[in-house]
Amino acid sequence: VTAKPENTVDFMSSLASAWERSGSMLCVGLDPDPAKLPATLGAPDSPDTILRFCRGIVDATAPFACAFKPQIAYFAAARAEAALEALIDHIHRAHPGIPVVLDSKRGDIGATAERYAIEAFERYGADAVTVNPYMGFDSIEPWLDRSDRGVFLLCRTSNPGGSDLQALEVGDGDRLFERVARLAATRWNRNGQLGLVVGATFPAELARVRALVGDMPLLVPGIGAQGGDIDATVSAGHGRAQPGMLVNSSRAILYAGGADDWAQAAAAAARDTRDALRNAAMRR
Amino acid sequence: VTAKPENTVDFMSSLASAWERSGSMLCVGLDPDPAKLPATLGAPDSPDTILRFCRGIVDATAPFACAFKPQIAYFAAARAEAALEALIDHIHRAHPGIPVVLDSKRGDIGATAERYAIEAFERYGADAVTVNPYMGFDSIEPWLDRSDRGVFLLCRTSNPGGSDLQALEVGDGDRLFERVARLAATRWNRNGQLGLVVGATFPAELARVRALVGDMPLLVPGIGAQGGDIDATVSAGHGRAQPGMLVNSSRAILYAGGADDWAQAAAAAARDTRDALRNAAMRR
């Protein structure tokens, strides 16, 4: 597999520049759900349709975004791996400086984790990934060899069932997600490239994670369709030196419009979300 | 994506038949590591080489196996998704009745998890999958709609770092992996299709999980290259009514031979492992 074009600076620098240049904390999630794609684009499960839709969304929303986050499941279910490669390639070429977080939530060890790192960083050229920490440090270590890339560990996820395990008390007054945050901020962060995924649906827990991890970047899903409040989210998760948050919105942007105005409607929704995040940051 | 040929009975029945017919608890893991493939087969990172190697391993070891477990990372890193589709198709056609567990350790929620279920069950035609439980029940629920397929939740993994989170005490005397086992055996197992992944490297914990989950099938990695003891593993994990275990070996079988005798050496290693597991079951 030949390496793809990519941002040439390391992920943390590229993210800091993207925050500054865009003035935005908005991360646009690319979840091309065949049930929701504009009918005007063609067969909804065709890789070509998926690529054209995502490319259109990217080009329409890039001025308002600090990052893009393609969700690999939507591509894998449609045999659209080549479309995902082409999409990330397009983002890097047409919108240089906007990092791409590949949302794949992989979690495995040793030689297998190394293969997943090759998938994400070499094959797809992603600037960062999401990783599931359940298997512990040796499932994270293989990703750290690429110290120029970002690794967002699942910490406190935005879904109701996130509490089933993550909210359990694990000793020393920590809940499981707090233990993950502590480990990520200290022992596990050998090369300074870790971030955390913390949902917007639990602002008090987002604030708790922020208190534990200093200025570590937080990828925050759960606003928009999932109902998280923007003011509460920004107040809880904003960093000191920099915004510190990639606040993700997918469905509320991707499917804001109809069959003919989807790109313009996505741009408007992205701009409004950027503004709402920016205003919340000024009010905090 | 068109559905692939697959075992027509449900996974639990197909597994019970496979145990009985094969007299084997061995699950052959298909982890085609390009650094270790026989040089005689061609370029090690070509999808064609990967497919020919895995097909050769499958045909050589099928008489000694109750299941096959392809690890998707090795295929994804080599752009070999089509080879993985062809491999699973080959197993179902050439060795009917041997179930295929797709080891992908996915973990996500809602519409995204549904896409992963389509990837595993429709695109690849897998009879069962591995799933990461960190995100809780709503990350497991979408898999349960396919009640004819098996779902093995990560519980106690065989790697040293597995203890970082899984061994934490979470209240009521449970460690995290025990809580996962309890949830999997009760509230989460709505359609009777769940199993657990429990490593062979911690026999006392394997015995503990077996005590918690009754006859639920356990997928047990960690013998062979990872050093788990076969007698201790079988003694700890064997079920009452049926073997109850898919004891996985990958590297010790795949790479048992050299450039010319890899298939015969794999067959011999698989036969020896089946016999060692069988003898351990008789001695327990």
Image: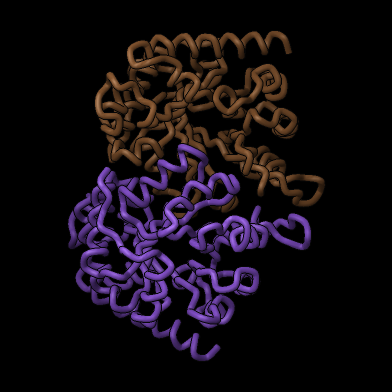
Chain colours: A purple, B brown
* Residue B26, visible in the rendered structure: yes
- Front-most of residues B218 and A241: A241
Quadrant placement of the N terminus of chain A: top left
Residue in view at x 31 percent, y 54 percent = A125
Image coords of residue A259 (percent x, y): 22, 67
- Front-most of residues B43 and B216: B43
Quadrant placement of the C terminus of chain A: bottom right
In which quarter of the view is residue B62 placed? top left
Image coords of residue B282 (percent x, y): 69, 8
Is A180 placed above or below B198 here? below
Residue in view at x 48 percent, y 79 percent = A243
* Residue B196, visible in the rendered structure: no
Residue in view at x 71 percent, y 28 percent = B203
In which quarter of the view is residue B58 placed? top left
Q: Is residue B203 left or right of residue A272?
A: right
Q: Is residue B205 left or right of residue B37?
A: right
**Residue at the far right in the pictured view:** B173
Residue in view at x 40 percent, y 41 percent = A115
Is A263 placed above or below A69 here? below
Image coords of residue B252 (percent x, y): 50, 21
- Front-most of residues A159 and B248: B248
Q: Is residue A49 left or right of residue B273?
A: left
Is A219 placed above or below B240 here? below
Tally of marks = 0
Image coords of residue A117 (percent x, y): 41, 47
**Residue at the far bottom in the pictured view:** A283
